[in-house]
Image: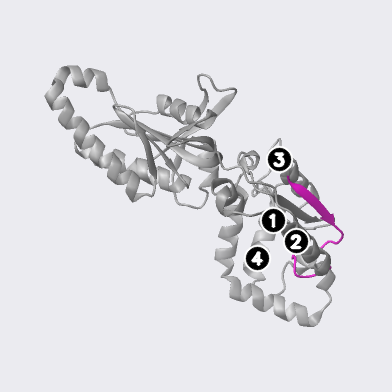
């Protein structure tokens, strides 16, 4: 969330500090450090959370320097009990495994400090190095120790690094490029329908469509960039709101006899006065071009950013988007 916020609101963030953090929870061919939720060892570990909850379960990896301290044991067990129920913790852990902000890292424009203990037994140091390598201009400080919890071990060295980073001279933040979620819509078969209905009736349809679109974009805290004639381009500061907006307008317009398609993508955009530009805008337009009638389609980036939000995605396959390098995994969300 902090990475997403820093990329979306660079004018509101003086610095980003990541400690013992990750870019992706699950393992992938190009990201070998994550956990495999289907691994038998991982299943046993999660079952341990259920059966050993309320004890100091996991202290050997999270705070090995305090593993023999009886007072800390009691504190840690209470800390766990107050943190949530066993089921809640297991669900949070599973949600973390689905998080993937790798596509967002290059869009961070604020001064960034990555702190990581070299021997961290929970999050491998290479995950911290990955963050530093993929966030432009990020500084990484590798600290000695095995503790994952920042408030145990050599905390003075860690806090000193934070103090030096925050009180030193800060570079100028570039705010003509920000992370945003781009939403495109268009009316299905608009040219054909306009010809069939005639100018007067078609104008009534467009007026109804425009009223609904503007109202819903505003309701979900988006910003209307422009009308495209038979559709809209809007931006949102969160992918979840963009999806909900797209779903809401699709449902309401369908009840009024107007079928639309919706395309959503999250990425870095260029701010050009009231207008926007950049490859992310092109990608959102290409996602829209592939979308089916009365459906909201998104890129994989959007899907990965809304893990835990309750959306039901259906995988539509990999597509070659016109003018965009590589293949893109696209998904639909039930509107």
Percent coordinates x, y for residue 197 in the rendering: 14, 21
Give whichever of 194, 174 is nearer the camera.
174
- Name the spot of residue 187 as percent of width and height, x first: 29, 28
Q: Nearer the viewer, mark 2 or mark 3?
A: 2
Residue 19 in the image: state x and y as whole percent. Answer: 72, 57
Q: CA distance from mark 4 to mark 2?
A: 32 Å
How far apart are labels 2 and 1 at the CA level?
A: 8 Å
Q: Is residue 93 visible?
A: yes
How packed mark 1 is, by other alpha carbons closer than 10 Å (few <14, some 14-19, many 20 or more), is some
Whether residue 257 is visible = no
Magenta range: 138-154
Which of pointers 3 and 4 lies earlier in the amino acid sequence? 4
Give the color scheme: rainbow, by chain, secondary structure or one colour.
one colour
Residue at left offset 78%, top offset 46%: 129
| Label 4 residue SS | helix
Q: Is residue 272 left or right of residue 84?
A: left
Q: Which mark is drawn over residue 162?
A: 2
Q: Where is residue 60, by image quadrant?
A: bottom right
Q: What is the number of the mark on residue 17? A: 1
Residue displayed at 87% across by 59% down? 144
Q: Which residue is mark 3?
A: 134
x, y percentage for residue 271?
50, 36
Residue 34 sits inside the magenta stretch:
no
Q: Quadrant of residue 256?
A: top left
Q: Are marks 2 and 1 in contact (CB under 8 Å)?
A: yes
| Cα separation between marks 3 and 1 | 14 Å
- Relative to 166, say whether 129 is above or below: above
Q: Which residue is mark 4?
A: 49
């Amino acid at each position: 969330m902090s990475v997403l916020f820093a990329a979306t609101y660079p004018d509101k963030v003086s610095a980003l500090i990541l400690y013992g953090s990750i870019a992706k929870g699950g393992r992938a061919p190009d990201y070998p450090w994550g956990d495999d939720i289907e691994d038998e060892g991982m299943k046993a570990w999660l079952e341990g959370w259920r059966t050993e909850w309320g004890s100091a379960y996991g202290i050997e990896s999270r705070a090995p320097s305090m593993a023999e301290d009886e007072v800390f044991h009691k504190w840690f067990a209470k800390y766990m009990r107050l943190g949530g129920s066993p089921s809640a913790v297991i669900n949070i852990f599973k949600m973390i495994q689905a998080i993937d902000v790798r596509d967002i890292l290059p869009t961070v424009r604020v001064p960034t400090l990555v702190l990581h203990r070299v021997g961290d037994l929970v999050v491998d140091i290479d995950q911290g190095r990955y963050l530093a390598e993929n966030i432009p201009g990020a500084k990484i400080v590798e600290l000695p120790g095995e503790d994952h919890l920042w408030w145990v071990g050599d905390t003075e060295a860690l806090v000193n690094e934070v103090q030096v980073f925050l009180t030193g001279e800060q570079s100028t933040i570039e705010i003509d490029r920000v992370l945003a979620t781009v939403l495109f819509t268009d009316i299905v078969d608009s040219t054909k329908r306009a010809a069939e209905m005639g100018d007067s009736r078609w104008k009534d349809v467009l007026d109804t469509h425009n009223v609904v679109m503007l109202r819903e974009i505003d309701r979900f805290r988006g910003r209307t960039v422009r009308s495209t004639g038979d559709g809209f381009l809007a931006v949102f500061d969160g992918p979840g709101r963009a999806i909900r907006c797209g779903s809401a307008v699709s449902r309401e317009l369908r009840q009024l006899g107007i079928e639309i398609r919706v395309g959503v993508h999250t990425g870095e955009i260029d701010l050009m006065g009231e207008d926007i530009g950049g490859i992310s805008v092109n990608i959102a337009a290409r996602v829209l071009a592939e979308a089916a009638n009365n459906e909201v389609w998104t890129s994989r980036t959007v899907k990965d950013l809304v893990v835990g939000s309750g959306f039901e995605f259906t995988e539509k396959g990999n597509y070659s988007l016109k003018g965009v390098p590589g293949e893109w995994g696209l998904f639909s969300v039930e509107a």
